[in-house]
Image (cartoon, rainbow, N blue to C red):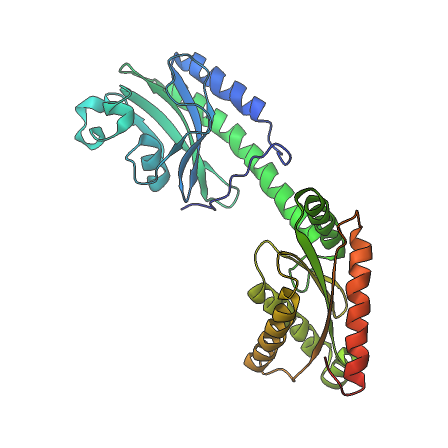
Amino acid sequence: MFQSNQWIFTDKDNQISLQKWQKTVDLMSDLFAAPAGFIVQAMQSGYRVVIASEQQDNPYTAGTMIPLETNIFCKKVVQDNHSLYVNNASNDEYWLDNPEVSKDGFESYLGLPIHWPNGDVFGTLCVMDFEQTDYQRNYLELIKQLRDMIEDDLFMVNSFVQMREIAMLDPLTHIYNRRAVSILSQQKLNLAQRLGFEVCCLFIDVNDFKLLNDTHGHEVGDKALVALAATLKECLREADIIGRLGGDEFVVVLQTNDTNEPLQIKAKIVQGYNAQLAKLSLPPLSISIGYGFAEHTKETFEILLNKADKDMYKNKLAFKAGQLL
């Protein structure tokens, strides 16, 4: 039913003008002569009011979250994925436990589902009145037209998110590419300087990867890289930055309070990668992992990456000498 539990509108990353949506809802409420109009987003955690019309009698404000189990009009619209018109709610037993009726005194509700481009329900567009209503056909057509305008905006948001993901993700492994890793890691470093936590960078390289490609072909080599990306995602936290720099070189940037944690993570990655390769019936491979910590003074990501790269190269030389660290 719900696309996700994420709140898609933030101050810094807002591809929709909420002022435009506000004007749309205010205009709708005026045309319907209704004391309340809303755009509501259906989320896994409940129903969130995105926009509330600005009349003084409106009991709900933008940002209000209504629990998922509450019997409200918008819940019915989302569940049925169909428009709903109730013109005399207090005479319908179905709505007796609806707080919008029993507590706030609403008698009339007209709402339609708003959809994402893939057809999933985003939420609702609705008007509510304390009096009984008798909306004619032209009013129903009007709210449909306003709903379509909102869906056009969601199409734009969806397209932007997809383009941004394409620009930031490595097409083979679907983890961050080098550009994205650089941007996100520098942001983490800047935050660390303000808040005082440690940042560690791991540089990971597959040993004898060229030999694997030459012996078994590039398709097998690609599968080995995808397996390493999957291992990193399994072994690390969601907040950690995981990326592929190119070829068989991968990087992890993480926040830590324990300077011994990288050693534990290294062992976990090696063990997890061996298990992934065996699960996929791929040839056994080893990896060299180096790491470095950021200085507390201002430091760029490239400097931190270079530290980890040098440490990885030291381990790579030890591997070639038969002394894998």
Residue 276, position in %: x, y?
Answer: 58, 76
The foreground one among 200 and 85 is 200
Residue at image position (37%, 28%) is 111
Q: Quadrant of residue 210?
A: bottom right
Whether residue 149 appears in this view of the structure is yes
Residue 232 against residue 75 in the figure, above or below: below
Residue at image position (72%, 49%) is 189
The foreground one among 151 and 207 is 207
Q: Quadrant of residue 156?
A: top right
Question: In the image, is 104 to the left or to the right of 252?
Answer: left
The foreground one among 171 and 102 is 102
Question: In the image, is 87 to the left or to the right of 152?
Answer: left
Q: Quadrant of residue 75?
A: top left
Whether residue 169 appears in this view of the structure is no
Residue 304, position in %: x, y?
Answer: 78, 57
Residue 290 against residue 51 in the figure, above or below: below
Question: In the image, is 252 to the left or to the right of 99?
Answer: right
Give the number of callouts. Answer: 0
The foreground one among 105 and 151 is 105
Residue at image position (80%, 50%) is 299
Residue 195 against residue 89 in the figure, above or below: below
Residue furthest toward the bottom? Answer: 322
Residue at image position (42%, 29%) is 64
**Quadrant occupied by the C terminus:** bottom right
Residue 23, position in %: x, y?
Answer: 53, 18
